[in-house]
Image (cartoon, grey):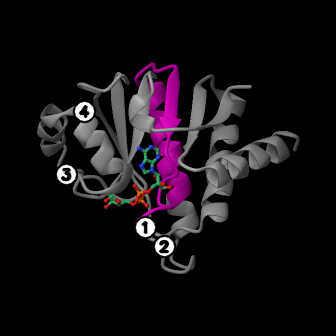
């Protein structure tokens, strides 16, 4: 089984890529984005300036600089506006396009934070369902060691339950 949930700080993980829950400027922010830029150092922002931003649901890759992770895949999740404005599709795109980029770059391991569930306000249960579904769908076709990184015990429990339930289907 190559989908696992763990609890911890994503900036500490020694994987081929960690995913950043960025905004469309790709020029940094708070939350996990701020933590990743702080840990990676100024060189990351310098490379991000060359990328000309990123649309919601899309993804772009950079090096990891001072991070233990080799790369950062920057994606932009949707802001939650009640769920009728394409949020589920856009969140799914963010996971799928990040996985696709990892595959195109021959990466073998990737770690995701809970995209959109902080500042962007996406309900955690709904977001976790989409995350697990997108990862399991991808794993039907391709090999990848995927980690879903929770930042609290309740987030971890939610992921573990969903992985268990949805893998049985
Ligand atoms: N490791 C793992 N997860 C973390 C970490 C960490 N070090 N820090 C926070 N989280 P958020 P968003 C969790 O707000 O909702 C930024 O300003 C956190 O508990 O970082 O997609 C960007 O620039 C939450 O569950 O991202 C954008 O403007 C999850 O990461 C905006 O926030 C995502 O929370 C993006 O908002």
Q: Which residue is mark 1?
A: 120
Q: Earlier in the sequence, mark 3 or mark 2?
A: 3
Residue beneath the point at 45% across and 19% down = 106
Q: Earlier in the sequence, mark 1 or mark 2?
A: 2
As drawn, 130 above or below 49: below
Q: Position of residue 3 (x, y in %)?
A: 67, 32
In 3D space, how far apart are the residues under numbered discs 3 and 1 (Cα atoms)?
16 Å
In 3D space, how far apart are the residues under numbered discs 3 and 2 (Cα atoms)?
21 Å
Confirm or reject: label 2 Cβ below 8 Å from ligand 1.
no
Q: Which residue is mark 3?
A: 27
Q: Secondary structure at mark 4?
A: helix
Q: Earlier in the sequence, mark 4 or mark 1?
A: 4
Q: Position of residue 162 (x, y in %)?
A: 76, 49
Q: Earlier in the sequence, mark 4 or mark 2?
A: 4
* In this rendering, position of residue 21 left or right of residue 50: right
Please state the extent of the stretch shown in magenta in the rendering: 91-120
Q: Which residue is mark 2?
A: 80
């Amino acid at each position: 089984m190559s989908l696992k949930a763990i609890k911890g700080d994503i900036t500490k993980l020694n994987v081929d890529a960690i995913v950043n829950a960025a905004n469309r400027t790709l020029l940094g922010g708070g939350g996990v984005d701020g933590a990743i830029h702080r840990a990676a150092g100024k060189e990351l922002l310098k490379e991000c300036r060359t990328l000309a931003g990123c649309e919601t649901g899309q993804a772009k890759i950079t090096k990891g600089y001072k991070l233990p992770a080799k790369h950062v895949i920057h994606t932009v999740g949707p802001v939650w506006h009640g769920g009728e404005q394409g949020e589920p599709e856009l969140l799914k795109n963010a996971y799928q396009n990040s996985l696709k980029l990892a595959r195109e770059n021959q990466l073998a391991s990737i770690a995701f934070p809970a995209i959109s569930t902080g500042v962007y306000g996406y309900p955690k249960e709904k977001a976790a369902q989409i995350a697990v579904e997108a990862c399991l769908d991808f794993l039907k076709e391709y090999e990848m060691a995927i980690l879903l990184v929770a930042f609290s015990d309740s987030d971890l429990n939610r992921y573990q339950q969903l992985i268990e339930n949805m893998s049985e289907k």
